[in-house]
Amino acid sequence: MGHERRLRFKTLVMVLAMVLCANTGDLLLKRGMNQIGVVQLSFSGLTHAFRLTISNPTIWLAIAFLLGFLVFYMTVLSWADYSYVMPAGAFGYALVTLLAVLFLGETVTTRRWFGVVLICAGVFLVGQTKPRTTEAAT
Amino acid sequence: MMLRSAVLLAAFILGGSTGEIAITHGMKSVGEPVRLRPRFVLHFLGRAVRNGWFWTGVPLLAFAFYVLLVLLSWEPISVVIPASALSYVVGTLGAKYLLKEEVSPKRWAGVLLVCAGVALVAAS
């Protein structure tokens, strides 16, 4: 593989790994916070919510996936542009919609499909730009 | 959305974007792993966690993360995520002016499509 193709390929693999970890983590986080309920914005409310948060296993599982996401994110950002990786990561929203339709049999509104099309078009455009536009640090 | 939610949303977007920009700057100065094998990635992570920019970014991300937790308990996710799609634009501005990345018209077009798309997907 040429240098440019190899750069694109490894960036793509890392972005996919990032997206999978982030989506799983977010889903678990939402589930965990639903178990905790509404957080009151007062000192006692926040400390109470904090105690519930750190003693919730679902939240910890979510944190593990989000840490995995952070590792992939840090690694890809060591060579690729932030303005390349960040929008490309939005592909996760499209992926989640497709998975929900294929495996959960969910129905998806026209508006949501339109959003998925916009995201895919946007990621496609960003994907055509050079993954790295800054010089390597010496 | 109430004013207090709007303030938290702004704090989430700014905290998250500046945190990620600080981490990007740190990772660029650490330099990429020689090869994408666990040993080299671990070595890379070891150097990354001794980078000052990384430790500038992490508290900002932690702050943004906790702000998001509070925000999600006040407002439905179908409101929070579409509104937070603005962070794609804020982050790209940061990449252009702080990280000096070249954001070509094509990349801008992609970012704006992604921003609109995320807002639509999450709103429904």
Image (tube, coloured by chain):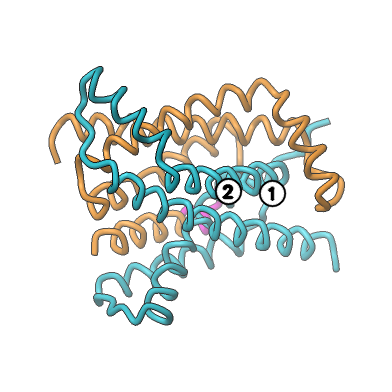
Question: What label sits on residue A132 in the rendered view?
Answer: 1
Q: Secondary structure at mark 1?
A: loop
Q: Chain of mark 2?
A: A
- Neighbor class of circle 2 (other Cα within 10 Å; few <14, some 14-19, many 20+) is many
Q: Are marks 1 and 2 in contact (CB under 8 Å)?
A: no
* Location of residue A38 (image quadrant): top left
Q: Residue furthest left?
A: B2
Residues marked 1 and 2, same chain: yes
Q: Secondary structure at mark 2?
A: helix
> Which residues fall within the magenta stretch?
B103-108
| Residue under the point 39% across and 68% down | A118
| Residue under the point 29% across and 26% down | A48
Q: Spatial distance from mark 1 to mark 2, Cα to Cα? A: 20 Å
Percent across and percent down for residue B69 are 33, 38
| Residue under the point 28% across and 79% down | A107
Percent across and percent down for residue B21 are 55, 34
- Of A46 and B52, the residue lying toward us: A46
Residue type at mark 2 is Phe
| Residue under the point 61% across and 46% down | A73
Percent across and percent down for residue A117 are 39, 73
Residue type at mark 1 is Arg
- Neighbor class of circle 1 (other Cα within 10 Å; few <14, some 14-19, many 20+) is many
**Mark nearer the N terminus (1 vs 2):** 2
Question: What label sits on residue A69 in the rendered view?
Answer: 2
* Location of residue B55 (image quadrant): top right
Identify by letter the chain in orange.
Answer: B
Identify by letter the chain in cyan.
Answer: A
